[in-house]
């Protein structure tokens, strides 16, 4: 019991240090990029050099980076993400408004991707002499070779402009399908290979000998043994989805976390960038932890 | 007293506006649609510049949205002239130091309280006391005091004449002093405009519902305006064609496809963005501290090709900060432009005379990540110079320019409510002077100050032109030309006309007069 508690505590500490490290790294990196928010306001806003200096003083941007970091960490420790220095709005509000869009996009993309990958891989094992194994390769190659923004533009031209089937702005269907295919491409090939390998195992031959149908063997005996592959890959895919929805958000005018992060970087809105970085880092750590736990629950070999 | 009448300036500017409007296939004031009866209702989706703050007094950046919920005493009309707006009329004393505004008696704020002279004074007091940055700061420094002698009279006394004042206060938004955050940063502006502030999500949208008690009878026609604030100008053209946007700012390279679409009209802002090459004037590196070398570089500039690259057939080639037809444009000066065509032989001869071997000289160029900057680089390279080109995003460029470790910057700047706002960039303590190389020239400062404090229009124009000649002679900045910002407008949008500046609500047009043919 004590050793399990120590293990969980050590994992939590590692995760905390990881998030802290990423935060500090982002904090430093965004300040290496030339220009700050005052420069942005000065571009078209008629700010004299004196006015800009005064504004930097008011915003605390004239302090040392270490001082700014300590102040910010102190606030975060008290649960305050602060104000967006560009829009004078609470950063928490901006994140809360953006989060549902990204979560919806990520969730449905993942569901579509997982369903497609498992469906096609399983079908390709059941009917190995059909075109389905070629479809496995096609989906895999598509996800490697076709950047999502290219697929997005293509989809806009075909489904929005030519066929006029759906709107462009705020469209959730196309982005979910495009990212879903991308997700499927990352899972379908390794899963198919694993399924094929499992299909040669002795217990599968036994099932055949018992007279079980091909589909039943795949669903009941082969697939459950290959689920650990799906789970391991799902962890990687989900962590990619956390920040990987940005191109779709920009292309389809979806106000999600990715778009918020991009706008914050372009506007050098430091408090927002830092808050989004913490959120993304924490999400990745949490997803890794959850997939680790699920993998242990499903695969007895990992419990030791 | 000088009454607010039609001046020569507005006549000239009006001629330009007419020409531009007709070329865009529209009649001014929505003449084509005058015979149609406007329909009430519907929500218009409008993609334009962003919105940086909910506090209009503190704005330091984009000004293309707030005009629909916050209005001002004056307004820049479509022809570029300044007209009374929330003020019924204004008088300027002969010495140019006292402005008397007679306010409209029937204007109420969105919270139902009347717009009185006291409320107007409270706004100007707030701007003068709290808003020490931005365009209005220079005007407010010239103010001696504000008075509200009765409910409909507001008086401004200046220390000395300031010709840009009426134009500049077209951005001094009048809000109810009961607006939340008045003592610090306003979070919900309560204005007088045809639409209310509504719901704002930064960088995403502003939903502005109709003001049912608007002071202009029967306006606005629309139930609401949905401002798309993503600032995704490149994607706007696609969204416009898909029918997701009614009106949208669009990039120049999208114009051919939009013009080919029967459901979309293309309109242009009446004022232009001007394109120029600036030299580093704050701390120039040799050999660009030699005016003859700058002149030689200017001979490498192919203005027609450059503007054609930027705006195609819509580009305007000139050597001035104003375009033909504008009151401050000078035809003789334009005709005498020695750089109207490139002359590489002359450029090389001048460089040789100045003892400059281009092959041994590296020119440091700084720009935004704009394709036209690369054209500038190629033109400079034609003289044999080595070019070290750094192209960064807006903020990176701003930072790099302010360090003055560069030689040439091909830049651009957008429409302004008054010509002074272009000249002020050349003043030693001017706002954000980096795009123009940070000029430090006390004599030029004095010339510009003299011009802006001159009451008589013609004398002021002559003084501004003298200042401009000095800028040209010293090659502080070399103007290439002008191009207007384009908007795509779907055919079911009626009564919409772009303005002189980005303002979507003006004394003679804008979103209050716009309606949807479908009524929804």
Image (cartoon, coloured by chain):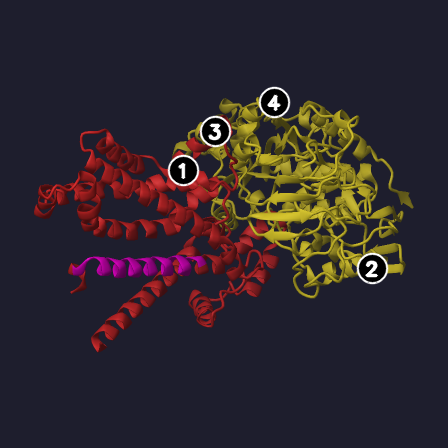
Disc 4 element: loop
Q: Which residues are magenta?
A: A276-300
In the image, residue A294 lies in the stretch drawn in magenta: yes
Is tag 4's residue or tag 3's residue first in the polypeptide sequence?
4
Q: Quadrant of residue A181?
A: top left
| Picture coordinates of residue B231, whole percent (x, y) | 55, 43
Does the CB distance between marks 4 and 2 fall below 8 Å? Answer: no
Task: Pinpoint the chain carrying mark 1.
Answer: A
Q: Position of residue B99 (x, y in %)?
A: 85, 51
Residue A223, numbered circle: none
Query: Which chain is rendered red in the image?
Result: A
Earlier along the polypeptide chain: callout 4 or callout 2? 2
Q: Which residue is mark 1?
A: A149
Taking B77 as reference, is A105 above or below it? below
Q: Which residue is mark 2?
A: B146
Marks 2 and 1 belong to one chain = no
Mark 2–mark 1 CB contact (< 8 Å): no
Our reading of the magenta stretch's main secondary structure is helix
* Element carrying mark 1: helix
Instruction: Name the residue tied to disc 3.
Output: B379
Chain of residue at mark 2: B
Task: Farthest residue to the front: give it.
Answer: A211
Q: Is A226 included in the stretch rendered in magenta?
A: no
Rounded to the nearest whole Å, what is the CA distance between mark 3 and mark 2? Answer: 53 Å
> Given this view, does label 3 or label 1 mark the residue nearer the observer?
1
The yellow chain is: B
Q: Secondary structure at mark 3?
A: helix
The local secondary structure at tag 2 comes to: strand
Q: Is residue B293 left or right of residue B267?
A: left
> Which chain contains the residue that carries disc 3?
B
Q: Residue furthest bottom?
A: A2
């Amino acid at each position: 019991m004590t050793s399990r508690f120590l293990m969980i505590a050590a994992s939590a500490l590692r995760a905390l240090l990881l998030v802290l490290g990423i935060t500090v790294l982002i904090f430093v990196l965004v300040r290496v990029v030339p220009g700050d928010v005052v420069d942005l306001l000065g571009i078209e806003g008629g700010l004299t050099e004196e006015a800009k200096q005064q504004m930097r003083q008011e915003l605390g941007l004239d302090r040392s980076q270490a001082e700014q970091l300590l102040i910010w960490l102190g606030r975060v420790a008290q649960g305050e993400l602060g104000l967006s220095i560009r829009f004078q709005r609470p950063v928490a509000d901006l994140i809360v408004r953006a989060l549902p869009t990204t979560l919806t996009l990520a969730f449905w993309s993942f569901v579509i991707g997982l369903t497609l990958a498992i469906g096609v891989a399983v079908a390709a094992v059941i009917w190995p002499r059909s075109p389905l194994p070629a479809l496995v390769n096609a989906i895999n190659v598509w996800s490697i070779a076709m950047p999502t923004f290219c697929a997005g533009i293509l989809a806009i031209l075909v489904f929005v402009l030519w066929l006029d089937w759906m709107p462009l702005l705020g469209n959730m269907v196309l982005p979910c399908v495009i990212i879903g295919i991308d997700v499927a491409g990352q899972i379908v090939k390794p899963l198919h290979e694993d399924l094929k390998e499992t299909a040669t195992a002795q217990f599968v031959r036994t099932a055949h000998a018992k007279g079980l149908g091909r589909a039943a063997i795949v669903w009941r005996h082969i697939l459950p043994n290959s689920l650990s592959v799906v789970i391991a890959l799902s962890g990687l895919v989900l962590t990619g989805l956390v920040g990987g929805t940005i191109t779709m958000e920009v292309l389809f005018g979806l106000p999600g976390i990715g778009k918020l992060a991009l706008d914050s970087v372009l506007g050098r809105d430091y408090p927002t960038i830092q808050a989004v970085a913490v959120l993304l880092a924490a999400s990745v750590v949490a997803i890794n932890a959850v997939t680790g736990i699920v993998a242990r629950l499903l695969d007895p070999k990992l419990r030791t | 007293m000088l009454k607010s009448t039609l001046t020569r300036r507005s006549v000239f500017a009006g001629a330009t506006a007419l020409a531009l409007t007709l070329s865009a296939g529209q009649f001014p004031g929505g003449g084509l649609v005058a015979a149609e009866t406007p329909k009430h209702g519907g929500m218009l989706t409008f993609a334009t510049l962003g919105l940086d703050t909910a506090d209009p007094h503190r704005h330091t950046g984009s000004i293309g949205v707030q005009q629909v919920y916050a209005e001002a005493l004056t307004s820049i009309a479509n022809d570029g002239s300044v007209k009374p707006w929330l003020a019924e009329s204004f008088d300027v004393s002969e010495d140019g130091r006292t402005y008397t505004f007679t306010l409209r008696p029937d204007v109420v704020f969105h919270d139902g309280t009347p717009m009185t002279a006291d409320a107007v004074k409270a706004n100007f007091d707030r701007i003068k006391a709290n808003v020490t940055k931005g365009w209005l700061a220079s005007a407010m420094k010239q103010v001696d005091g504000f008075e509200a002698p009765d409910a409909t009279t507001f008086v401004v006394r200046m220390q000395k004449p300031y010709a840009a004042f009426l134009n500049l206060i077209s951005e001094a938004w009048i809000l109810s002093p009961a607006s939340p955050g008045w003592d610090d940063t306003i979070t919900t502006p309560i204005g007088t405009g045809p639409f209310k502030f509504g719901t704002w999500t930064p960088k995403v949208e502003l939903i502005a519902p109709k003001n049912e008690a608007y002071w202009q009878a029967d306006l606005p026609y629309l139930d609401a305006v949905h401002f798309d604030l993503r600032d995704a100008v490149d994607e706007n053209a696609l969204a416009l064609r898909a029918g997701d946007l009614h009106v949208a700012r669009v990039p120049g390279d999208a114009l051919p496809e939009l013009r080919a679409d029967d459901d979309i009209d293309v309109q242009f802002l009446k004022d232009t963005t001007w394109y120029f090459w600036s030299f580093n004037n704050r701390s120039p590196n040799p050999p660009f501290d030699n005016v003859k070398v700058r002149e030689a570089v200017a001979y490498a500039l192919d203005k027609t090709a450059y503007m054609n690259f930027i705006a195609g057939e819509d580009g305007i080639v000139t050597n001035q900060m104003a375009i033909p037809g504008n009151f401050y444009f000078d035809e003789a000066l334009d005709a005498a432009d020695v750089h109207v065509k490139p002359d590489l032989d002359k450029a090389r001869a001048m460089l040789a005379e100045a003892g400059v071997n281009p092959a041994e000289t590296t020119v440091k160029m700084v720009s935004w990540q704009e394709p036209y900057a690369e054209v500038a680089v190629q033109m400079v390279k034609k003289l044999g110079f080595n070019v070290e080109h750094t192209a960064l995003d807006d903020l990176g460029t701003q930072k790099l320019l302010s360090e003055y470790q560069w030689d040439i910057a091909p830049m651009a700047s957008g429409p302004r409510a008054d010509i002074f706002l272009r000249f002020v960039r050349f003043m030693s303590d001017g706002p954000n002077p980096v795009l123009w190389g940070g000029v430090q020239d006390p004599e030029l400062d004095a010339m510009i100050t003299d011009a802006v404090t001159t009451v008589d229009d013609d004398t002021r124009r002559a003084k501004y032109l003298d200042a401009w000649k000095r800028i040209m002679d010293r090659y502080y900045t070399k103007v290439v030309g002008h191009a207007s910002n384009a908007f795509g407008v779907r055919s079911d949008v009626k009564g919409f006309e772009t303005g002189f500046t980005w303002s979507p609500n003006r004394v003679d047009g804008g979103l209050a007069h716009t309606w949807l043919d479908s009524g929804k």
